[in-house]
Image: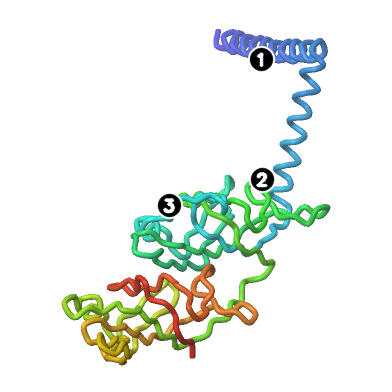
Amino acid sequence: MANKSFKTNHSIKTNNSYLAGRQVKLKIQKTVRFLTRNYILTIFLACILFVGMVVVARTVFSKPTYVYVKVKVGQGLWWASTARPPIWLVDSIKKGDVALDLLGKPQAKILSKRYYRWYSSDQFDIYLTFKLKASLNKRTGEYLFNRSVLSVGSPIEIQFPRVDITGTVINISKTSFKDEYVEKIIYLVYQGGYYKDFPYRYDNIKIGDTYFDGQDKVFEIIDKSLEKNIWNVANNLTAQLFERDVETTQNIVVKAKVMLKKKGNALYYSDDYKVINNSLIPFATDNYFFENFVIRKIE
């Protein structure tokens, strides 16, 4: 009886295996007939599969190309006049942050961050340096990042884990940037900026105040002074003019040490402001903004 039961179970299992195999065979035959009748769909699916295999192969096996890119953070279109980034965005961007691609591999890294206050507002000019994993179009010589062309003046967007960065590309290099910085002494003058009954503009300037741009100390107040104004006073009887010192209204003179970027024979504060005599540049420390101060001398 036991032998008979074993044979029965074995026969059932054999029949089940046969039926399962036949069902699979029927499904394959049905699929082949469907694809044969709908050959256009078959060709379309084959093309998608082929393109997908090529993309995966290039992504996995191709050697990545890295480029170095400088970006000014903003809306992205350099000719569009928009508000500059606020302080909360400055604080959210961290040097060393890495953005990953779909395969979990690094595609962008922040190498440096510099930021400068824009005039008297709480807006900033932010300049970032990235190392990007890009692809090179050998035919045109163009670099592509996230399917967009990398070129000076073009917009760029990079999504990091905690911040979304958009901006304008201002420089591209195959190798890391070697910027040259020099220290200069400048004299800032506010013509008639001191009033005897309103001394606060002068008094609030503190010798030793500095500004740190995220990488270096780029501005430091080393001295300040007042210059008496000399007015011409006319004699009402003879109309003769006399020179007279005036103490109630005086010029404010600030001596400062600044770190400037050298580009050829020109000097720049940040990447946008050329430092020359009589130029008005938004210098600031952590405690003071130099509104209406003009460069009168560079040493």
Q: Is residue 41 left or right of residue 265?
A: right
Residue 187, above or below 280: below
Q: Residues within 10 Å of mark 1 (few under 14, many from 20)?
A: few
Q: Rate crowding at label 3 as few (under 14), some (14 to 19) or many (20 or more) other CA atoms within 10 Å.
A: few
Type of amino acid at the residue the image marks with label 3: Ala
Quadrant position of residue 244: bottom left
**SS of the residue under disc 3:** loop
Please state which of the two labelled residues, at mark 1 or mark 3, is closer to the viewer.
3
Discs 2/1, front: 2
| Residue shown at the point (73%, 53%) measured from the top left | 62
In this rendering, position of residue 77 left or right of residue 148 = left
Is 121 placed above or below 209 here? Answer: above
The amino acid marked with disc number 1 is: Ser
Which residue matches tag 1? 17
Provide the residue designation for mark 3.
Answer: 83
Are the residues at dot 1 and dot 3 in contact (C-beta closer than 8 Å)? Answer: no
Camera-side residue of 190 and 35: 190
Q: Is residue 262 left or right of residue 195?
A: right
User: Marks 2 and 1: CB-CB under 8 Å?
Assistant: no
Classify mark 2: helix, strand or loop: loop
Q: CA distance from mark 2 to mark 3?
A: 27 Å
Q: Quadrant of residue 213?
A: bottom left
Taking depth in this image into account, of 133 and 49 the one nearest to the observer is 133
Which label sits on residue 147? 2
Instruction: Estimate the x, y position of residue 190 in percent, counting from the top left.
Output: 35, 78
Question: Residue flagged by tag 2: what amino acid is it?
Answer: Arg
Q: Earlier in the sequence, mark 2 or mark 3?
A: 3
